[in-house]
Image: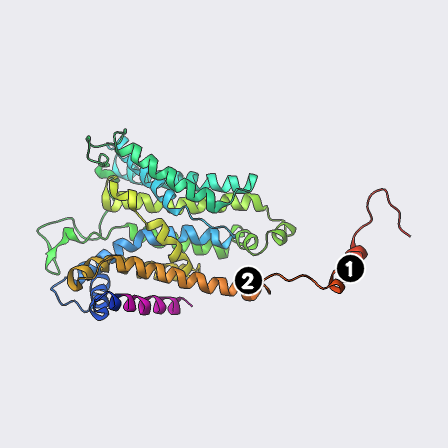
Amino acid sequence: MPFASVLFAFVVGAIVVTVTGGNPIDAYQGLLCGGLGIACTQGENPALQIANTIVYTIPLITTGVAVALPFRAGLFNIGAEGQLLAGAMACTALGIKLHDWPAVILLPTVLVGGMLAGAVWAGIAGVLKATVGAHEVVTTIMLNYVAQWLLRFLIIGGPLELAEGTSKSLPIGDGAHLATFLPNSDTLQIFGLPASVYRVHVGLVIALVAVAVFAVLLWRTSLGYEIRAAGQSQKAARYAGVSVRRTIIVTMLIAGAFSGLAGAIQIAGVDHNLTDKYFSDTTGFDAIAVALLGLGSAVGIVLAAILFGALHAGGAVMQADAGISSSLVLVLQALILFSIAANFLNAIRLRIPGLGQAPSAPAPAAVGAALMTEAAVAPPQEGTTTT
């Protein structure tokens, strides 16, 4: 199903490019060059393109996990974007406030702070779901907007603003920076370019550890069993002794921590401050497609994140080389998500007979049989006698 969804998206994307007067071969060649460093014809550096793809992939892995874990519990975490922003804001605030701390203390502090902020953000939706039944789709979407407006407050005339009118925050302390795999040097040449342009950072290792933790948690722990049981059937899970309410809250807390970690990694490893680009960031929303395309598995999430990271990195090269708008990347992502959703809906329809069909009035005989069966199995009401 994932391969078919991707193939469908690229076929339809080629049709769209052709209809709009473009050349799909040139468009996809640009995507291959920008995303994977393959088939470059305009002098692009393949190593740099691969490095850019990795940088884009890192937050998609952790946010993909943040969406996939609640899926396993029967929950829809549409709030990975807000949780990522919460983590980014917490990381930035701590990195600014504690800038003079030694790196060995400051770096773990900002990362853990980002995780805690994301966990709290998602935990709000989890508590509301577990206590009053508020649907997590509604609450997580609303919390996305709250996070976006809180970000605006902080960096536009707020306490973290660098200077009036800049729409960016103060930079975090140097001790809060994630190390890069290559030296940050303009004199050292790697594959014909300064080493400083290759921005691949240690966040890649953290993201891979996060996805490994996700796999172990889900399949090798009692909590993972409870999450999967609650996702299969809450009623059956209760009979098995699982506290569904606690499972919902804990699952959302852990998911939020993963998203918050993604936000902290972006600040510590790439941007080093909050900017207005986060107003339109879509990483948390792309994570939904990553989790679905990866079928909720650890390996699948990594592969799907690489695909989406390559699309992001390749879009700019495609536009420069082929003259095709980078918006085609968004079209491809939407088509992939549409195809996956259609397959899931079809699977649900097959599992639930009659779903999607017009309701028909039950036959009188069927109604009578149902009433007789109910009367036969129903316990006697209090205050009545049976013979």
Residue at 33 percent across and 59 percent down: it is: 333
Residue 249 at x, y percent in the picture:
51, 43
Label 2, secondary structure: give it. loop
Identify the magenta region: 1-16
Report if residue 221 is visible in the image. no
**For marks 2 and 1 on the same chain, the one whose residue lies earlier in the sequence:** 2
Task: Give the spatial CA distance, label 2 vs label 1.
Answer: 27 Å
Res 193 label: none
Q: Is residue 8 magenta?
A: yes
Q: Quadrant of the N terminus?
A: bottom left
Is the residue 7 above or below the residue 57 in the image? Answer: below
Report if residue 118 is visible in the image. yes
Label 1, secondary structure: give it. helix
**Residue denoted by label 2:** 356
- Identified by mark 2, the residue type is Gly
Residue 211 at x, y percent in the picture:
39, 54
Overall secondary structure of the magenta section: helix
Of the pair 72 and 42, the residue shown nearer to us? 42
Label 2: how many Cα within 10 Å (few below 14, some 14–19, many 20+): few
- Identified by mark 1, the residue type is Thr
Of the pair 320 and 232, the residue shown nearer to us? 320
Q: Which residue ends up furthest to the left in the rendered image?
A: 187
Q: Nearer the viewer, mark 2 or mark 1?
A: 2
- Left or right: where does residue 126 sit relative to residue 327? right
**Quarter holding residue 175:** top left
Residue 239 at x, y percent in the picture:
65, 51
**Residue denoted by label 1:** 373
**Quarter holding residue 320:** bottom left
Q: Are marks 2 and 1 in contact (CB under 8 Å)?
A: no
